[in-house]
Amino acid sequence: MTLFHTLGFPRVGQQRELKWALESFWAGNSTQQELLDVAHSQRLANWQRQLQAGADFITAGDFALYDHVLNTSYLFGHLPERARHGDDALNQLFLAARGRTPCGCTSHASEMTKWFDTNYHYLVPECRAEDEFRLQPELLLEEIRAARAVYPKVKAVVLGPLSYLYLGKSLDNSNRLNLLPKLLPLYSELFALLKAEGVDWLQLDEPILALDLPSDWAQAFEPAYHTLRNNGLNLLLTTYFNGLEDNLSLALNLPVQGVHLDLVSAPEQLTPALDRIGPYKVLSVGVIDGRNIWRSDLNAIRESLLEAKQQLGERLWLGTSCSLLHVPYDAASESQLPDGVGQWLAFAQQKLEEGVLLRDALNNSDVLSSATWQAQANAIQARRTSTAVHKAAVKQRAADAAAFDWQRDLPFSERAVLQQQLLKLPLFPTTTIGSFPQTSGIRQLRRRFKQGELTLAEYEDGLKAEIVHAIRVQEQIGLDVLVHGEAERNDMVEYFGEQLEGVAVSANGWVQSYGSRCVKPPIIYGDIERPQPMTVRWSEFAQSQTDKRMKGMLTGPVTILKWAFVRDDQPWSATAYQLAAVLRDEVQDLERAGIRIIQVDEPALREGLPLRKAAHQQYLQWAVNSFRFSVTGVAADTQIHTHMCYADFDDILPAIQGMDADVITLETARSASKLLATLQSSPYNNGIGPGVYDIHSPNIPAAEAMLAILRDSLAVVAPENLWVNPDCGLKTRRWEEVIPALEAMVAVALELREEVKVTEQA
Ligand code: GLN
Ligand code: ZN
């Protein structure tokens, strides 16, 4: 019989129970036991869901209070030295993750980075040549025992040794691969312990096999896995997020009992896998999408698997493509969505049901005539033909846009002259990235409005007062280009999602971003239209309050796409051009309303890069062209800004230049020298504002540090192109921090203007 299993389950809780429990514990308002009680009831609920749905295994070891990579570091006694404080495991985990414990100890937090190309962030393991490992299995074993008390067939999950080391960073420039011989014996030891606990299968995640792996890493797999002694434990090597391509044979030849492939992202690997799998191994096929929220077309999936079923029989397993960590819990609670969209969604709960239904249909064709099977097929059909999804004119406009190479009418050098005539900005103009502190006042306004305590008019008056306050502060500080502060936006993507047709905002579609942080990605389900302008009246109002120039503020097409659940029935690029089309209309409406500086943020452009290099060029082509489609409908003297939040631009600088924004502001304060070195080797010719201070820190930035960044910038940027700004939005800061920081920044700009004047006179 074919089995069904999931690679992992969400853990924040359907109502974000774990989030609230963590935050309460960190704030000192609850005990460790109270936190653990909530955590344990969440993982218990996960197992019960899997069991009740009829999964063949329940998965354990996927739970984490903060992050599963951090748990792996703990498991192998490899937390940073500074976090190994006292012998309380939770204190150590939180000290590593957050740089502080409830008991008041502090150190610096570990670096966090994106888990592959998802919006989940993991804590980067820190490696040094002399590192030693030590097995600390008690947290994992406790979880496994708790799971086995629910159901004896438990599949444990652990991050594999090569992926663990690869995802780490070296603090001393040593090769992390050299740590492998020290780490492997602990895996063998762990296998023996798991076997002794009654675990039959261990899922060993090796997602790095889906990357362009450096050859020494790829070559390390075979000897490493031959060294592991599995002690009779069955190993399922899992890969996801991409096809294995050149690593496919490598993976299938490893001495493990099963291999899992992600057939959602790379269905084409099934045929070669069937050719190469051999006579003994289990092939687990990830066919239920673990990263997106659409119901599966089970008929189509079943048909695609018939040959595999025939060849492999019970050695064919079904799984989710990756862990369900990346989707919310239960779509049954989404009854408020427009256009019947709720019927088309599968969150984690529905994915379990789909997997089990598909399994049953593969094992027994009678299932094909069941009502559940039919209902699933009907939902797929309804979505495919819905008039809320398909709008011919919208599709046509996007297709036409994609076929055209969008450019401003004049080159930057000529636009810059015209813009200067209009805007009359000083040398080294000062500005900010868009958001100002989301104060408790603003949050309270929003809450009271949502709960019906405030009328719309009262709510908006409150927001206007916040905007006026932000403007007065900026005027007082002496900034040159002002922003309204984004008080009306809860989130830079959701705000637009709420206003666009074809995009739905769920009530409870929370997904963990990191630790206790969750996001609620909007759901792009249909062809996109803008019933009315989205930001114009706020920008207009703000402009009416000041004589300084007000910068309009939009979120770009690629960023909306990357931070949403995207429809899977057309290429991403088609959806990007649809978003760009409505943004283009918005940009033109802003211009018409007299807003002549307009920023279109694309912080997610860099993280949208596909995992494999071979796909980069194609992505950058549509990402950049759709951005240009959104901003090229304006007069030459309207100034287009963009903003990005990532400092590693080496590999995409030509694409960024290709966006041809008049000004780009960048997050650089933590690595300005790196950006400047990049600019040295490939110059950037339009306006640029390398962030002069790090907004993530509450500290007032030192004038010397800001001046140094600007002076260094002048070596690679023409003075008339250099802007002065912080490195990101100020939404997470307090006014008490923002005001002195911006005062210091403006003072630095004035000083630099003086310096340049003196040199010119001399
Ligand atoms: N305009 C946004 C802000 O200032 C940009 C945020 C971002 O780059 N992530 O908040
Ligand atoms: Zn940013």
Image: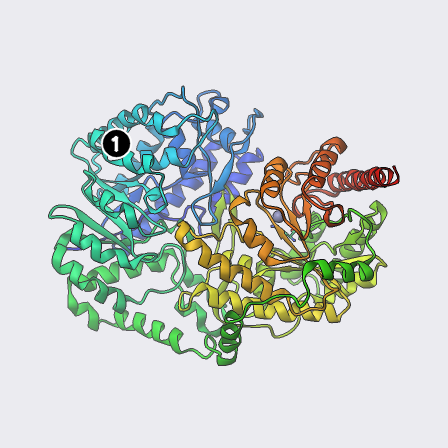
Whole-percent x and y of residue 299?
A: 26, 69
- Direction from residue 148 to residue 727 in the image, left or right: right
Task: Give the quarter of the figure containing the C terminus.
Answer: top right
Q: Which residue is mark 1?
A: 224
Residue 502: x %, y % from top left: 51, 71
- Residue furthest to the right in view is 761
Which quadrant holds the N terminus? bottom left
How many residues crowd mark 1 within 10 Å: few (<14), some (14–19), many (20+)? some
Residue 695: give x, y in percent of width and height.
66, 41
| Front-lying residue, 681 or 487 | 681
**Quadrant of residue 127 in the image?**
top left
Expressed as whole percent of the image width and height from the top left, the position of residue 203 reads 27, 41
Q: Nearer the viewer, residue 579 or 452?
A: 579
Horizontal side, residue 115 vs residue 270: left or right: right
* Picture residue at 74% right of the left edge, 45% below the top: 724
Total labels drawn: 1
Question: What is the three-letter code of the residue carrying label 1?
Answer: Ala
At a point 58% along the width and 42% down the height, the residue shown is: 681
- 147 w.r.t. 171: above or below: below
Q: Is residue 328 in view from this perspective?
A: no
Does residue 498 lie above or below 57 as drawn? Answer: below
Q: Is residue 352 left or right of residue 608?
A: left
Q: The residue tagged with tag 1: helix, strand or loop?
A: helix
Nearest the viewer among 578 and 140 is: 578
Q: Is mark 1 within 8 Å of ligand 1?
A: no
Q: Please say if 721 is above or below 740.
A: below
